[in-house]
Amino acid sequence: KKMTNNMLYNINRNKTNLNILEEQYSSGKKIQRTSDDPVIAVRSLKLRTNLAELNQYYKKNIPDAKSWMNVTEGALNTANQLLTSMHKYMVQGANDTLTKADRDSIVKNLKELSAQIYQEGNTDYAGRYVFGGYKTDTSLLFEKDRTDLSYTITESFKGNQIENITKVKDYGEFSNYDLSNLSPEDIGNSPELIHGYRIQLSYMDLAKDVDGQGDLEIEASPEGDLPKLITKSMNDPDAYEPADNEVHYIPDTGEVILGKEAFNQLRKKEDISITYKKDIFKEGDLRPEHYFNCQKLDKNDPDGKEINYTLSNQKIQYEVSFNQKLTINTQGRDAFTHDIARSIEDIIFAIEEVEKTESKIAEVEKYLKDPSVEDKEGLERLLKNLDAELSLKNKVLQEVFGDGMTAVSKQQDMVNVAVADLGSRYVRLELTESRLA
């Protein structure tokens, strides 16, 4: 009987084992319920969790990160190509005395190239702006003219960022002369160059009060006495000739012009902070909130509440593997600066000065050819001085183009660094993807 019982037990046990194997075969699962094998059940649940995470990284996060970075790299490479083209025009302007047709052609091309470079900063991926940091719903540029916003902007400078500038002191308006009856004694001194010092702000056409005064504050550290600040119009004859201990603020051009003593004071400062207001923006201008500590006021807001923006390092990070995050974005200020636009504005101002003198020369030559004008000695002396003035202004124009070359080269260096940084992160992403695969 005992042998019979053992035989029946073994048969039933084998039958049960066979049933288990058949269930495993038919279902493809080693266990049907947790109680079948708690250890295997725990391992299985953990494996499922790991596989779900792997799928999230491998099939969603990494492809999305790669797409974002590819779009960013494409925009940076396009900007680099545009900067190369811009550099050629700057070289042409710096090395040649240009005709009016040459100048018009170069400026037109520079404007178009500049606009397209900054437009690359508005590149978006799936409706999110890739260069806006955390503000992915805010474009890097103003996409239309805006007069409904007022910004109080604080820019930071170092003493060694103060520039040397050169201007030509010309004869002013011809209203001072009677060209039909001009004697040599009426003619002033020969034209001369003005050498000065400048801090160029990131914007021009800055806000003024009802009296035409600019609202600008200068702070510097280490603390100490600061020079006297005077607001000037760009058309004031002495706008670029401040007294030694004066600073001329020119809101029209966004320039702070320093006298000699004022320059010696500020160039020794470790930090210079300049606060000003701007309430007119043109299409294509860079938004201040991406570049500076600033306050924005919407003039249409009935509550009149200001929005404060604090400059910070805004890294957008994706989790691409277990406990591994990767920064996918490049911030606009690391690749696109105001320098290109400001350089072109300097070139346009310098060209306007050249054309102003050319217009005066044409007017004098017209009177020299007029047979009704008998005494032409005064006109000939005036023409000689104007020719000298034109020569100086062409020289200054070439120097401004040279400064533009430097600005373009620095901008290209920034873009190249941004591309290299993005590329190194992309390689890391590909290695992670390969390991997950």
Image (cartoon, rainbow, N blue to C red):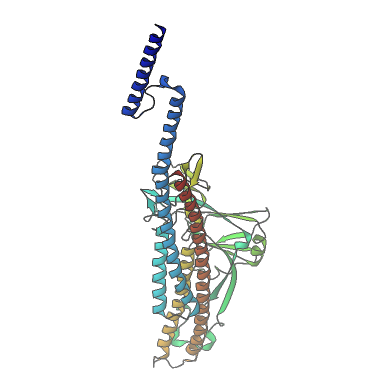
Q: In the rendered picture of this protein, how many numbered marks are placed on residues? A: 0
- Measured from the top left, where is residue 203 in percent x and y? 48, 59
The N terminus: image quadrant: top left
- Measured from the top left, where is residue 86 in percent x and y? 44, 69
The C terminus: image quadrant: top left
Q: Is residue 15 left or right of residue 233?
A: left
- Measured from the top left, where is residue 298 in percent x and y? 42, 46
Residue 333 showing in the rendered view: no
Give the farthest residue toward the top. 1
At horizontal 51% and vertical 81% (from top left) the residue drawn is 389
Q: Is residue 247 left or right of residue 46?
A: right
- Measured from the top left, where is residue 425 in percent x and y? 49, 52
Q: Is residue 196 left or right of residue 142?
A: right
Residue 109 showing in the rendered view: yes
At horizontal 53% and vertical 74% (from top left) the residue drawn is 399
Q: Nearer the viewer, residue 298 or 132?
A: 132
At horizontal 45% and vertical 22% (from top left) the residue drawn is 38
